[in-house]
Image (tube, grey):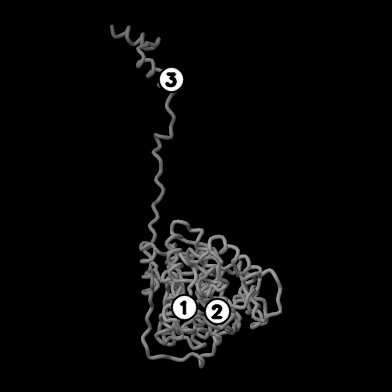
Amino acid sequence: MDMFSTQPVQPVVAGIFYGLEWQGPNPEQVLRAPRLCEELQKAAQTVRLDADDFRQLKMSWVISQMNEAKQEPEKYSLIAAAIFLGTAQACLKGIYTCETSLKQVDCRHLVRPISCFHSLTKMPLQSSLKAVSEKQHILCQSGCDPVDAALQMARAGRRVTLLRCTALEHPKSECRTYHNIHEDQLFFRTTYFEAFERIEEDIQTVANDAIREGGIIYSSGIGILRGSFQDGAPWVEQPPQVDVAWFGLPLHPHHGEQEIYSDPEERNLVSSTLDRVFAWACAHGADAIVMPPFAVNMGGFLHPRLHFAGLIHEASKLHERHLPVVCVASEHPAHCQAAWWDDFSKGVINGRPVPPPIIHVPPIPLMSDKLVGKDAAALLEKRRKQQGVWSTRSRQVRASLV
């Protein structure tokens, strides 16, 4: 199957992605980095590089490769690399062509998002939180990536904030490999990677330290350029803008019985972090928050599922006056089973019900006669009787009866 579209688009300057190992003075080549060269080499293993323009990648090729990847999972990373290269080229050149409408879209106004930093000790002023008359809706969407949910809401006129969470122990801010098709779609399909590469320039501090200290890095003006992978990652004809809030949580908190946080300090940390993130999103003008179940079975996180769902509900209700929509969406394989998702979504929407008390069964004592050993002489006498051998004592008893 032909990989690239034949529709004419603005030509790519040679060398932006071809020959990345050489340095060049062209300011459009600011993203030339070893990580991009590595991803291009991975894609070259299964993809024909007949053209240097990955913006022309066909939707039909992506769909067919996604179907093949169900049997060959190693192809997922290569598909992701090809998609990311096309998105990066669109940002560098400031233009792409929609395959469905054949219209050229100017995206230059979306390629430089701005980030700011909110420290652990800062909370927004109450005057910056605007009350709304709309009733709050808490939604859960299974089989839907958070970027897709954000795209739908942004098209409906919502001001959306996407939540991104990494581990406090490993914030992953120094480098990023764009190959995880389930967890990195925010980088593949939006201009967030531009903000990510320039975060330290914007906030004037080390991103790793900022996340470890409990801070929130808030990026505004992120453009969603591509649609769902399942649809072939089509270019969006009218790309909307969203915000992204990046923060950290502990990777493996202690679990108690009935899926709860056993350590109150860890529970309070998660609860207060969600509260601060929701508050800053509202202060930046968001009226919808979209998030994956990031703390449960993805990204290395392993939090108690039902208790975390309840904390999301509590944070949503705390900001009910300012936040009309809260959406939890995921198409991650770890969350697709109905048995996992149904209970989790109920906890998010309605709050986790109080678990029934644990009934502890008292230990059953062993019978005392089982603990007393039998007399060795009696056991020997019994054995002789079974074998038909008469002992001296048995002969005496027998003689007295005759």
Q: Amino acid at mark 1?
A: Trp
Q: Earlier in the sequence, mark 2 or mark 1?
A: 2
- Residue to which mark 2 is pinned: 90
**CA–CA distance between discs 3 and 1?**
92 Å
Q: Residues within 10 Å of mark 3 (few under 14, many from 20)?
A: few
| Nearer to me, 171 or 195 | 195
User: Which amino acid, mark 2?
Assistant: Ala
Is the C-beta separation of discs 2 and 1 under 8 Å? yes
Pick the front one: 69 or 46: 46
Q: Which residue bears the numbered disc 3?
A: 377
Residue 235 got which mark? 1
- Residue 335 in the image: x percent, y percent? 42, 64
Image coords of residue 59 (percent x, y): 44, 71
Counting from the top left corner in percent of width and height, residue 92 is at 59, 80
Left or right of 351? Residue 4 is: right
Query: Are the residues flagged by discs 2 and 3 in contact, CB closer than 8 Å?
Result: no
Looking at marks 3 and 1 on the same chain, the residue that comes earlier in the sequence is marked by 1
Q: Secondary structure at mark 1?
A: loop
Q: Between tags 3 and 1, which lies in front?
A: 1
Q: Please identify the quarter of the rendering in which residue 34 is found.
A: bottom right
Identity, as a three-letter code, of the amino acid under mark 3: Ala
Residue 101's disc number: none
* Contact between labelled residues 1 and 3, with CB atoms less than 8 Å apart: no
User: Quadrant where the N terminus lies?
Assistant: bottom left
* Res. 238 image quadrant: bottom left
Residue at point 68%, 68% (across, down): 21
Mark pair 2, 3: CA separation: 95 Å
Is disc 3 placed on a helix, strand or loop?
Answer: helix
Q: Disc 2 versus disc 1: distance between alpha carbons?
A: 10 Å
